[in-house]
Image (cartoon, grey):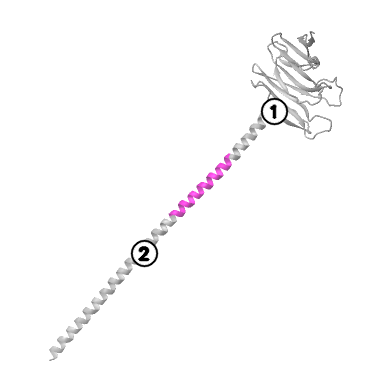
Amino acid sequence: MKRQILAKTIVIASSISMIMMIAGCGKNEEYASYQEENEETIENTDIDDTNTSSDESTTLTASEDVSTQTVTESQNDKTSSSEQENSSENDTDKKDVSLESDQMIEAESYIDSEEECYRVSIGRKESIEGEYDHVKDYFFVNVEGKEISFEVEYPSKAASMDTDRYVFDACDFEAEYVDVTFDGRKDVVISLGHVGAAGDMAHCVYVYEDGEFVYVKSFENIPNYSINEEEKCIEGVVNGEKTKYTYSDKEFVCEG
């Protein structure tokens, strides 16, 4: 009897132990499954974080590239602008131009299509009643590879009309680089405006001679001048009548 009870007790204990082991194993398997799921979640989270970090890094890098490019372009624009300003200043510095404190450069350009005669126009910073704003010109002429320069000043309107290069009404100071002496060398002719009630055009001239440009007063006596290439002379026109002039002994002489 005792042996039977003992045997039953052992069987029952064994069953209980088995049940507990089975339960324990189940819990361990559930825990292991739970742990694996958590590890996958953590790994996925780490991957997402890594991707997010990579995306942010890429975005930041792209942003930095755009910023760098913008700054570089801005610096290039400033450099280009600075180079242009320096180039313009250097072009002016190359020319021997003298300015008073109340004067400024009005304009500068070539007056001929061959780009041999360069003109720098000087004007007043502030207008004076009864006077032209334009006060003088500088000419830089390339003659056979050599630059020859000269200055042309214009008198006040209050001066006598017999004054050299006197400027009459409605003057535009137009300049031409043409040969008026028919020696094969071009000269510089400048408009001096309209004379009298008839409005005849007057001009002054700087003739090329012996490596320099020389002012010749007598050219201003030729009204409405034109060049007659066939007869190698200058023609003046008054009231429809033409008068011929030739250059001789450094003067323009009327030939009738």
Q: Which disc number belongs to residue 41?
A: 2
Query: Magenta span: helix, strand or loop, mainly?
Result: helix
Per the image, the residue denoted by label 1 is: 108
| Mark 1 Cα shell of 10 Å, populated few (<14), some (14-19), many (≥20) | some
Mark before the other along the chain sequence, 1 or 2: 2
Residue at left offset 65%, top offset 35% = 85
Q: Is residue 53 left or right of residue 201?
A: left
Place of residue 152 in the rendered image (x, y in percent of width and height, measured from the top left): 77, 23
Please, what is the three-letter code of the amino acid marked with disc 2?
A: Thr
Q: Quadrant of the N terminus?
A: bottom left
Please, what is the three-letter code of the amino acid marked with disc 1?
A: Glu
Give 242 or 195, whichever is nearer the viewer.
Answer: 242
Residue 181's image quarter?
Answer: top right
- Indicate yes or no whether the magenta region holds residue 60: yes
Residue at left offset 15%, top offset 89% = 5
> What separation in Å lies between label 1 and label 2 (alpha carbons)?
78 Å
As drawn, 24 above or below 8: above
Identify the magenta region.
54-76
